[in-house]
Image (cartoon, rainbow, N blue to C red):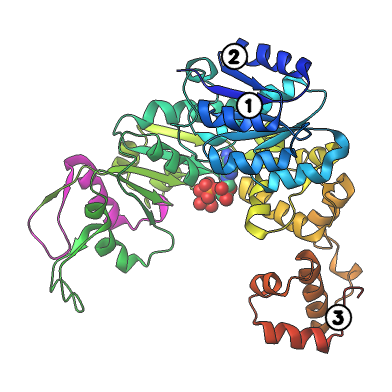
Amino acid sequence: MAYIVLVIDDQPSILQSMEVFFQLRSWKVHTAPDGKKGISLARRVQPDLVVLDIRLPDMDGLEVLKELRSRVPNAEVIMITAHQDMESTIKAIKAGAFDYLHKPIDIDEMDSVLKRLRAMMSAAPVAADDESANQPLGGLDTLHLIGKSKAMKEVFKKIALASGARVTMLVQGESGTGKDMVAQAIHRNSPWNNKPFTVMDCSTLAPSLVESELFGYEKGAFTGADRTRAGRIELTGDGTVFFDEIGELPLHLQSRLLRFLQEGQFVRVGGVAPIQSNARIIAATNRDLLAMVAEGTFREDLYFRLKVVTIHMPPLRDRRSDIPDLARFLLEKIAARTALRPRMLSEGAIGELMKRDWPGNVRELENSLTRAALMTKSTVLSEEELAAALDGDRYQPATERSVKSLADAERDHILFALESYEWSLGKTCQALQISRPTLRAKIRTYGLGKNS
Ligand SMILES: Nc1ncnc2c1ncn2[C@@H]1O[C@H](COP(=O)(O)OP(=O)(O)OP(=O)(O)O)[C@@H](O)[C@H]1O
């Protein structure tokens, strides 16, 4: 089955060129010259994608977008806008459009948005364009895993190959590279995706609790065990148990996990009867497990058992070409999370992001962009604004920095929060995690006003 696209535009030349563009990529194309016809056609053909001009003869493109969101909620929408339509473009993105393209439409840009769309809708291989070109978007997973660099294409390929088999997998990579997301993608793309996905974060659970959490316990197994309880493996049934930071799993539990992997059964703490389980195990680590094996803190047999299928998550500095798409995606995510206006990036700002090393990988990129979105007011971030927001005065030597009093810092921070949320007291209280009366009292104390 081919993807279905509906192009709504009043310019016959655009309709024609889009028709050719999509037909060449094996899409089924429908076209409409105005908003009303577009909406009624969309209801009939249920497209996977709508390419929508923001200026239409009969209706405002934003209204059409709103109608489409409620009548064909599964369709993604790409807006076609003019450069001077920035305000409406932002509104469109806020109202749920996937992306926008400026007129005249650049084919490469359109291709790149389409690829990103498909990567967003599924963790299925972006690399496998040819194989996946004829699958409907609607049926696919909606996990947001961005990347079209060679290294990420390898990751997608492995996810696709390994998700179908119940093999144990190891996801390795530096912190913040997306290991957690990959584990979820493997589960979501597996035939058992309607079964539970259970996370065991070995770094945060107290070692004394891990065993009973994982394998469950029998009534009377220890003080306080007043009833029998199933552990996470048992509760997961045929689903997936994701061991995050497997390197932190205490040695005695490594043996128990290995036995479970070998025999497919386990015994509850304090119990004797073995319990069968079909749960699939995915483990992740940012540690060098081989080095841990050498120093005796990780069992060699468990290491070999886990590493049969390994996915290496490349650090962000080794796939800089992913940074523009990632940054745009993260800015949309940040806007949705913070209720701030979505920010866009100038060419210079993208260059600034691409030249950094990002030791904390995608997580650091996301945190930095959140900071930039909060600190700047511009809709389109320039290189200078971005650099200033990212570096702030954090990297100035302490001798050059004048240390503010606590009261001044509090005043500035409250003002900054108020301005970030355009003086919405509700949102500001939520962000600062203080009550409304406290915020009002602080506004009075510091004499803050819109022109402070
Ligand atoms: N390819 C990606 N596309 C979109 N977002 C991503 C991608 N990779 C990572 N992220 C985002 O970056 C953040 C960190 O990702 P994640 O928690 O999966 O990393 P991790 O490698 O498991 O980190 P850690 O080792 O610290 O647990 C998350 O907010 C995630 O949504």
Specify the label residue 25 is tagged with: 2
Name the amino acid, label 2: Arg
Specify the label residue 114 is tagged with: 1
User: Which quarter of the rendered picture does the N terminus lie within?
Assistant: top left
* Callout 2 secondary element: loop
Is there a contact, CB below 8 Å, between mark 1 and mark 2? yes
Q: In the shown orientation, is residue 223 left or right of residue 9?
A: left
Bin the neighbour count of mark 3 within 10 Å (Cα to Cα): few under 14, some 14-19, many 20 and up: some
Question: Separation of disc 1 and disc 2 at Cα?
Answer: 11 Å
Mark before the other along the chain sequence, 3 or 1: 1
Q: Quadrant of residue 62?
A: top right
Q: In the shown orientation, is residue 268 left or right of residue 255?
A: left
* Segment colored magenta: 245-273
- At which x and y percent is residue 351? 81, 37
- At which x and y percent is residue 248? 41, 56
Question: Separation of disc 2 and disc 3 at Cα?
Answer: 57 Å
Name the amino acid, label 1: Leu
